């Protein structure tokens, strides 16, 4: 009896358990009435599971020698040769950890793994992946991201099969993204990215597993650029001044709003006083106004135009050289809890502005 193999790894043997199963599958049945002449029936039956170790195209040749003995010292032998040919068994996967969670401003990476197994012992599966989908839930009702955002989200995923990769192994996946690549997401907005990992045994057998990464946005406060935040008013001459404040919000679906309050009115008077009376203060404060850009309600970035215009009569109380400095606090709010401030001042009787 002999068992010899032709394997893809160059080996010609099988292991002990495999050989035992291959040999045990052979049996003979002489005719029950057995006269001086007769027939020996042989049978070869083996379980599918006992052959799973064979890859496609691999063979095992088992030779069984049948001996007929007349019990008088005469024998005759005949070899029965059974050739077993392997076919492909597709690899299988076990989803150890296939869900990732990323939070802007906090958790920017996640990892997991997928175990694979191939019954064909000489197969050496390889792993690849492709981004399958990137879907958003945005405050403006959109479900997409722009091309650059999608590129960054997809590029953050990678896999690393075990270096020794046998027929069985593990695929480690990693998701790591830069904070700046997520700034566009507003608080509570999400992006779900699905990556399909494929294990291929190079014999036509493949199996896939999706890895799903959920990215959640947090709030980025707006920022301000003080384009012109100092005004100068001169009684009897210049009675108005204007300027502007640019704002930007990284959260693309935020729609910031602007408001202002009069913060202080401080005088330098010839009599040493630092205050004005109630009517004078009311007129000085009422002269200030702001006008956000008309498109502001549909963009995350914009400009706030401020204006200070006062009537000559409202300044008659000021003697030559006396000044009043008025401070106005402009607040830009993204309605998600984020605000920005800025301060500037101008000499009397002119507004001093603070932005927030």
Image (cartoon, helix red, strand yellow):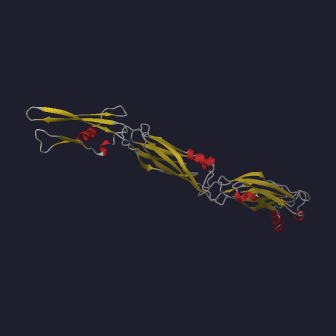
Q: Is the N terminus in the top left, top right, bottom left or bottom right quadrant?
A: top left
Inspect this view and state whether residue 344 appears: no
300 displayed left or right of 20: right
Residue furthest to the right in view is 236
Relative to the observer, which residue lies in front, 33 or 219? Answer: 33
**Residue 192 on image: x %, y %:** 55, 53
**Residue 70 on image: x %, y %:** 10, 35
Establish if 207 lies above or below 136: above
Inspect this view and state whether residue 133 appears: yes
Residue at left offset 54%, top offset 47%? 131
**Residue 112 on image: x %, y %:** 47, 47
Relative to the observer, which residue lies in front, 339 or 150? Answer: 150
14 displayed left or right of 136: left
Residue at left offset 63%, top offset 52%? 184
**Residue 5 on image: x %, y %:** 31, 34
Q: Is the C terminus in the top left, top right, bottom left or bottom right quadrant?
A: bottom right
Residue furthest to the left in view is 72
Residue at left offset 51%, top offset 51%? 212
Residue furthest to the front in view is 37
Question: Quarter of the image holding residue 323?
Answer: bottom right
76 displayed left or right of 229: left
Task: Say how many tags the image has.
Answer: 0
Question: Quarter of the image holding residue 137?
Answer: bottom right
Relative to the observer, which residue lies in front, 112 or 46? Answer: 46
């Amino acid at each position: 009896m002999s068992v010899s193999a032709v394997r893809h790894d160059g080996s010609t043997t099988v292991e002990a358990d495999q050989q035992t199963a291959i040999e045990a599958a052979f049996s003979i049945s002489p005719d029950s009435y057995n006269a001086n002449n007769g027939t020996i029936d042989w049978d070869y039956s083996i379980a599918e599971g006992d052959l799973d170790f064979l890859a496609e195209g691999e063979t095992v040749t088992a030779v069984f020698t049948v001996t007929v003995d007349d019990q008088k010292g005469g024998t005759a032998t005949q070899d029965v040769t059974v050739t077993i040919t392997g076919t492909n068994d597709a690899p299988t996967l076990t989803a150890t950890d296939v869900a990732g969670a990323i939070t802007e401003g906090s958790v920017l990476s996640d990892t997991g793994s997928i175990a694979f197994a191939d019954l064909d012992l000489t197969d050496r599966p390889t792993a690849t992946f492709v981004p399958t989908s990137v879907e958003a839930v945005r405050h403006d009702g959109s479900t997409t991201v722009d091309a650059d955002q999608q590129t960054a989200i997809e590029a953050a995923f990678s896999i690393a099969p075990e270096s020794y990769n046998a027929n069985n192994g593990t695929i480690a996946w990693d998701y790591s993204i830069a904070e700046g690549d997520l700034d566009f997401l507003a608080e509570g907005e999400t992006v779900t990215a699905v990556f399909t990992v494929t294990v291929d045994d190079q014999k036509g057998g493949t199996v896939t597993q999706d890895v799903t990464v959920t990215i959640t946005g947090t709030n980025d406060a707006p920022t301000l650029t003080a384009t012109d935040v100092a005004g100068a008013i001169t009684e009897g001459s210049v009675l108005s001044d204007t300027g502007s404040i640019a704002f930007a919000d990284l959260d693309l679906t935020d729609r910031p709003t602007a408001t202002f309050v009069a913060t202080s009115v401080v005088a330098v008077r010839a009599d040493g006083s630092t205050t004005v009376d109630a009517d004078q203060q009311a007129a000085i404060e009422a002269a200030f106004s702001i006008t956000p850009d008309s498109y502001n309600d549909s963009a995350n970035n914009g400009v706030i135009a401020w204006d200070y215009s006062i009537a000559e009569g409202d300044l008659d109380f000021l003697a030559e050289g006396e000044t009043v400095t008025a401070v106005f606090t402009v607040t830009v709010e993204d309605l998600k809890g984020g605000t920005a401030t800025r301060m500037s001042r101008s000499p009397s009787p002119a507004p001093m502005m603070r932005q927030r």
